[in-house]
Amino acid sequence: MLESTIMKNKENAIKDIDVLIPKLQSKDAENMKLTRVMQFVFIPIILLFAVLFIAFPDTESGVNLRLAGAFCIPGFLIFLIYFSYYYQKYKSVNYSDSVKSVLQSAEKRFRFWHPIYLVVFIAIILVGVGLGLIFTPMLPELWSSIIVTATVIVVLLGFSFGFYVGYKQWEKESKPLLMATKKLLKELNESY
Amino acid sequence: MTKKKAKFKTIIKENEQKILGICRHYSSNDEDLKDMYQEVLINIWKSIDSFRGDAQLSTWIYRVAVNTVLGFTNKEIRRQKLFLNQSDPSWQNLADIDENTAKEKEELFQILENQINQLSVIDKIIMSLVLESVSYKEISVVIGITEPNLRVKIHRIKNELKEAIINV
């Protein structure tokens, strides 16, 4: 009965493709948009920092601003590269690979920790240090070390909480998929 | 973009039955079939630029279809059921069923379908490709294992299915 329904609707299926294609094209455009948005956000910021803090820093602020620029610019560059390249690569699945290759990629994707996170973490530190070098001299001298210490503690607590929440989410959603994928790979790798 | 659209339409028109064949085995109703079929089309669209002509188009299509089915039910991957089509005689080849077998065809079909759904996910995928009369060489390329390894797996599965029929 299923087969006869399919045969009857063959013409409709072809027509459905004509309806589907514009949606697919707009989805492609949407995905490109995210990469473009990130590039348009980070490129002007990098140029702004390069001009303000490296090429033409305020001479009254001395070496501080140049140092701030030297920290922030590499940090933003890392974010730009991450969102331009690694994010797309990480999120996409190549369905035309063999089943074994797709499972191997999925196994890597479902892991909790990826080495690229270390690079992104370093970028966050760099930007943090850079922004600290910019804003700390603006603070009243009496309070500056207290405020800086408090800010660092709050940021570290925030990161720790974020890490914990991220781990719990991974444990609930991705870990079962990781275990299932590993089991399938083990079965595929069995040789007789 | 027009070139991609034309290529996509040609590929789908020439391979629609192959895609439907795979999707049919994993759909219990028309609605599921339609959803799964559309998901395969989406993934063919996404992967179309990666087809370089280094593998057969049918192999490439089967890879996308099978990988889509694997990912379609996401967390339910372990419980994904394989549905056989009783009107298509190819199911009898799964366990080398003799025309003269005493048991009724209906009974045999039920036993076989139950037993096939005890198989692992990979074994079910392999058997769905066997049901589509895909060559062993092509199945091994789709799955990503060697042909001798595949033949041993299929031989083992067929023996398990035969035993299930004898022992019931």
Image (spheres, grey):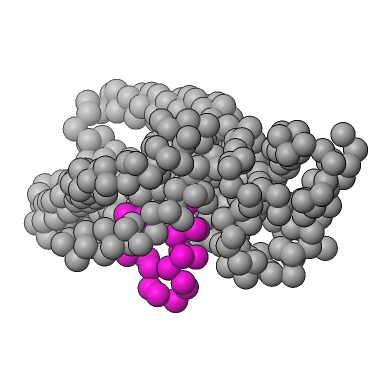
Residue closest to the eye, A185 or B105? B105
Q: Position of residue B21 (x, y in %)?
A: 49, 49
Q: Is residue A191 left or right of residue A62?
A: right
Q: Quadrant of the N terminus of chain B?
A: bottom left
Tell me if residue B102 can be seen. yes
| Percent x, y of residue A54 | 17, 57
Residue B51 falls within the magenta-colored stretch: yes
Quick check: is A91 in the magenta stretch?
A: no
Any part of residue A33 in sight = no
The residue sitting at 20% across, 43% down in the picture is A19
Q: Residue at x 21, y 62 (%)?
A: B6
Q: Main secondary structure of the magenta part?
A: helix
Residue furthest right as drawn: B167
Is B168 placed left or right of A94 in the picture?
A: right
Residue at the farthest bottom position:
B54
Q: Nearer the viewer, residue B57 or B164?
A: B164
Front residue of this view, candidates A123 and B11: B11
In this rendering, the answer to whether B141 lies above or below A58 is below
Above or below, A14 against A98 in this view is above
Left or right: B49, with B106 as reference point: left
Question: Which percent across, then down, holds residue A157?
Answer: 46, 25
Instruction: Locate residue A57 relative to residue B165 in the image: left or right.
Output: left
User: Residue B77 location in percent, x, y?
Assistant: 59, 37
The range drawn in magenta is B44-65
